[in-house]
Image (cartoon, rainbow, N blue to C red):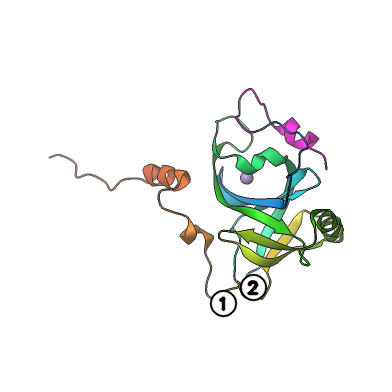
């Protein structure tokens, strides 16, 4: 895993995002989903692997409904410490906008192996473009797969597997975001107010 690209894109004197260093969790592998209001609102889906966070930008957000295939664009690895990052990325910086944590927890391979074995299996899946894993988050739970659409491409699909956690109802991650979230507050302020009647 390399964080060179991550570091190159950012000016750490200007952004409070963590500088890229390799680091791992002590116990179980972790995942995080960040909701990010940049030029466009999207979700960043990150899985810890070998001391960094493998990262995908998911425009529509994840779904717990197996019939949804959510486009996930693979982006550069992020440092492990990014799992806790939330707040404002100032104007003029890469990804300028607001970041909030939408869900987080631990994760493993489908077999729920010990960390070392899990990392081996996950790495194999990643290379194959068929990455199966189990999430233990607050919102996202159970088995998922990330499937690469084409080799030499960064577009993947994030799909929920049928299991006891799956739903067959419409799933909209936006609806599961509190109105009081920093991004939703900022968006509400930006909305044009109803035109006031002009004084005669
Ligand atoms: Mn992002």
Query: Range of the magenta residues?
Result: 1-17
Principal SS element in the magenta part?
Answer: loop
Q: Which mark is residue 168?
A: 1
Mark 2, residue position: 66
Report whether residue 109 is seen.
yes
Identify the residue at image location x=59%, y=68%. Answer: 64
Q: Nearer the viewer, residue 148 or 82?
A: 82
- Mark 1–mark 2 Cα distance, whole angstroms, equals 7 Å
Q: Quadrant of residue 16?
A: top right
Ligand 1 positioned in quadrant? top right
Q: Is residue 185 left or right of residue 146?
A: left
Task: Evaluate if marks 1 and 2 touch, with contact meaning CB atoms under 8 Å apart.
Answer: yes
Q: Nearer the viewer, residue 173 or 104?
A: 104
> Which residue is found at the position 73% from the left and 33% from the top?
20
Q: Secondary structure at mark 2?
A: loop
Q: Residue 2's spot in the image, x, y percent?
A: 82, 39
Q: Quadrant of the N terminus?
A: top right
Position of residue 25 relative to residue 165, above or below, is above
Residue at image location 44% in from the left, 54% down from the top: 178
């Amino acid at each position: 895993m390399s964080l060179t690209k991550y570091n190159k894109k950012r000016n750490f004197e200007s952004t409070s995002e963590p500088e890229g260093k390799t680091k791992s969790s002590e116990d179980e592998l972790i995942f995080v989903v960040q909701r990010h209001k940049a030029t466009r609102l999207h979700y960043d889906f990150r899985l810890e692997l070998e001391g960094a966070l493998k990262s995908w930008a998911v425009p529509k957000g994840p779904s717990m409904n197996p019939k949804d295939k959510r486009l996930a664009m693979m982006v550069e690895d992020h440092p492990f410490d990014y799992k806790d990052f939330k707040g404002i990325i100032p104007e003029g910086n890469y990804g300028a906008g607001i970041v909030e944590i939408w869900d987080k927890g631990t994760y493993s391979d489908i077999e729920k192996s010990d960390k070392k074995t899990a990392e081996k299996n996950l790495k194999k899946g990643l290379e194959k473009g068929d990455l199966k894993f189990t999430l233990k988050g607050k919102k996202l739970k159970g088995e998922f797969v990330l499937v690469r659409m084409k080799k030499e491409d960064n577009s993947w699909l994030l799909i929920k597997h049928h299991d006891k956690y799956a739903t067959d109802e419409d799933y909209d991650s936006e609806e599961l975001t509190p109105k009081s979230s920093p991004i939703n507050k900022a968006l509400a302020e930006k909305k044009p107010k109803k035109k006031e009647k002009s004084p005669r």
